[in-house]
Image (cartoon, rainbow, N blue to C red):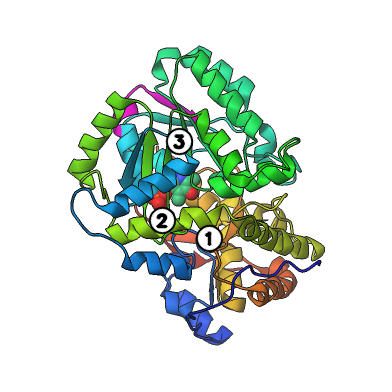
Amino acid sequence: MKTIIEPFRIKAVEPIRMTTRQERKALIRAAEYNLFALAARDVMIDLLTDSGTGAMSSAQWAAVMRGDESYAGSPSFSRFEAAVKALMPFRHVIPTHQGRAAEAILFSIFGGPGQVIPNNTHFDTTRGNIEASGARAVDLVIEEGKDPASEHPFKGNMDIGKLRAFLEEHGEAVPCVMLTITNNAGGGQPASLENIRATAELAREFGKPFFIDGCRFAENAWFIKTREPGQEARAIPEIVRDCFAVADGMTMSAKKDAFGNIGGWLALNDDALAEVARGHLIRTEGFPTYGGMAGRDLEALAQGLAEIVDEDYLRYRIRTNAYIVERLEALGIPVVRPAGGHAVFVDARRWLSHIDPLHYPGQALAVALYEIGGIRACEIGSVMFGRQPDGSEKPAAMELVRLAMPRRTYTQSHADYIVECFEELADLAPRLRGYRITREPPLMRHFTCAFAPLED
Ligand SMILES: *Cc1c(COP(=O)(O)O)cnc(C)c1O
C-alpha cells in the first residue's frame, strides 16, 4: 500500500478551539508579535516544539498508575534504569527533570573558564550551560550541514578533519567531545553510524571522553537504517546500541525520543565521574533513584522507550515530515532538504529575500502563518542567534522557520491543512514586511522580546 497510516487509533481527544483570521490578527498584535507570548488555547496547530508535547500511549498511562513514589529504591527507578540500559549500555544512569539539568551537571564537571567543547552543533541549552560555566562551545558540523539545499544523507555528521585539527590545536583545553543526534540546531539532520564511530575513535586517540546528546536517538537510528549502506536489515534497537556502545556517556531529554512530557538523564561509564555527578544531582535535582522526576514519570519513560524504537512508528514519524516537505517543494517554497527527523524547516532567507536578515524574515513568516491558519511555528534565525555577546547584531547563518512535529499528536488532515496554509501564504509572501525589536532581555531574547512591524 502507498498510504502510510498513523500506526495508532485515538482513545482520548483534546479539542482544538477554532479561531478566525480576524481574531488571530488581534491576538498576535496583543502578543507584540512574539509567538511565545500567545496563550496555547489561541493556537490551532502548535508546532512550536516537539519537546514534551507528544501523546502518551494507553500503555504509558497504565504505567503511570504503577508509579512508586518511594523516596529511595523505588521499583519504578529500576524499571526506568533497565529500559535505558537495554538501549544504551552505560554503567550509571542518573535521572534528571530535563535534558538541560543533565547538561548542567555534565558541564559542572567538564566546563570552566579556558575550556573548549566541540560538537557537531550545540543545542541552545547545551551552549548555554557550557558558556555559563565559563567554557566555549564550538560547532564543527560538515559543510553540507550548513547548506539548506544540500542533499547529503547525513548532514548532522561531525567534520572529522576539522575535529582532528581542533583537538591538535586546543589539546589540554578540550575536556570532552560531544555529538548531537539528530542535529537539532542544524535542522534535525542525522549523523551516520560510521561518523559516530569515527568521532569516538578520534576522541579516544586524543584521550577525551566522548558524550552523545541522544535526544532523538531513535529518529537518528531510523535514518541510519534507511540511508546507510549495510544497515537496512538491522533492527532499530541493535543500531541504537551500536551508536552508544562507542560513547563514554550521554545526555538525554526524555521529552523527545522517550515519549515523555517531562524527564531526562545523564548516563556515563566512569565510576568516579558518576559519583561527582550524583553529588551534584542530590544537591540540585533529587535522590539518585528519582532525580528530577516522580516515580510515575519514570514508569512512563520506561514504557516510552520500548515504544519509540518501533519501526511502524518511526516509518510514519519520518514520513509525515517528508510528505510536508514534498508538498511545500511542489509549491516552490524553499525548505531544508532532506526533511529532518522531528521538524520541517522553511528557508525564510531564500523565500523572503526582499526582507533584510536583520528585519527577521523568519519572524515575518511565522507571524503570517499564525494569522493565516492559527499555526504556531518557531523562528530559528537572527531573532534567536543575531544578538552578539558584545551587544551588536549580526545575521545568523540561516533564517529558518521550524515546524516541529509533536509525536503521535496530529493526523494526516492536520498535515494537509498545514500545506494549505502555505499555499495561501505563497500568494502573500512577496508582500510580507519585516519586523524590528522594540524590547528585549539581555539573554535568550527570542522567548520574551517584543516586535513591531516595519512600515512601508
Ligand atoms: C531539547 C534538547 C535539549 C534540552 O533538553 P530539555 O529537556 O529541553 O532541557 C538538549 N539537546 C537537544 C538536542 C535537544 O533537542
Task: Return the residue nearer the eye: 283 or 421.
Answer: 283
Q: Residues within 10 Å of mark 1 (few under 14, many from 20)?
A: many
Q: Which mark is residue 301?
A: 2
Q: Which residues are magenta?
A: 108-118
**Kind of residue at disc 2:** Leu
| CB atoms of marks 2 and 3 within 8 Å | no
**Kind of residue at disc 3:** Pro
**Kind of residue at disc 1:** Cys
Q: Which residue is mark 3?
A: 89
* Dot 1 or dot 2, earlier in sequence: 2
Residue at (29%, 31%) from the top-left corner? 274
Residue 456 vertical position relative to residue 89 in the rendered view, above or below: below
Q: Which mark is residue 378?
A: 1
Q: Residues within 10 Å of mark 3 (few under 14, many from 20)?
A: many
* Dot 3 or dot 1, earlier in sequence: 3
Q: Secondary structure at mark 1?
A: strand
Q: Quadrant of residue 140?
A: top right
Residue at (67%, 63%) from the top-left corner? 320
* Dot 2 or dot 3, earlier in sequence: 3
